[in-house]
Amino acid sequence: MPKTWRAAHEELARDLSRLVEARVLGPVDVLFGLDQGLRRRAFEAVLVWTEELLGPDDDTARMTAIRLISTLFPSDEPFDPPSAWWTTPFGRAVLLRAGHPTAEVVSFTVAAAMLGITRQGVHDLARRGKVQAHPDGGVTVDSVQARLKERLLSEAETSAGGSGSAGSSGGAGSGETS
């Protein structure tokens, strides 16, 4: 069932808050102690980032996604999260607004996680030309991103027509039919 735009914001804000707590505030608290002022500033920043990630400005959303990934997931290696990460609210927002920050092609398994369907479902979509298979294996991130956007727009239109919701979050079902 598609989520309302408000629910999408709340879900993303909760996910970002969890990440900021675990990857930034928790370690700072352990090392130096943490005052409520910094926690409040972090909460306010999460609300701003949520608005930027889900807002109308594609460039701002893309830059926010990249900035958050590079800060919350620092590494000397290219960003390569586990497949399940793409099913999180933040993972879904990153896919929708920035694609995969370090890859143009992903495996069928990763594409399945990105779309919230089975690997066989991705093979079926590739066979039908709904996502673009890559000659060296896998599928292009751009085609997965486009497929997800198309599906979310369709869900939003269906939801708006039937229940008056104003949008969709990127929640994924387990199947693809069109």
Image (cartoon, rainbow, N blue to C red):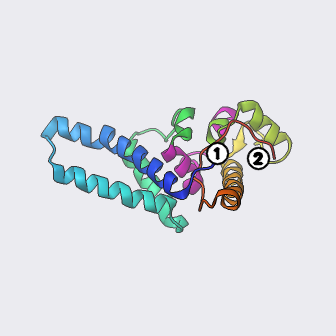
Q: Residue at x 18, y 35 (%)?
A: 30
Q: Is residue 152 above or below residue 108?
A: below
Q: At label 1, which amino acid type do we have?
A: Met
Determine whether the residue tagged by mark 2 lies in a helix, strand or loop.
Answer: loop
Q: At label 2, which amino acid type do we have?
A: Val
Looking at the rendered image, the quarter that the N terminus falls into is top right
Q: Earlier in the sequence, mark 2 or mark 1?
A: 1
Q: Residue at x 66, y 42 (%)?
A: 115
Q: Say few, some or many: other residues with alpha carbon within 10 Å of mark 1 (under 14 / 14 to 19 / 20 or more).
A: few
Tell me the magenta residue range: 89-111
Q: Residue at x 51, y 52 (%)?
A: 8
Q: Main secondary structure of the magenta part?
A: helix
Q: Which residue is mark 1?
A: 1
Q: Which residue is mark 2?
A: 131
Q: Nearer the viewer, residue 17 or 94?
A: 17
Q: Nearer the viewer, residue 177 or 128?
A: 177
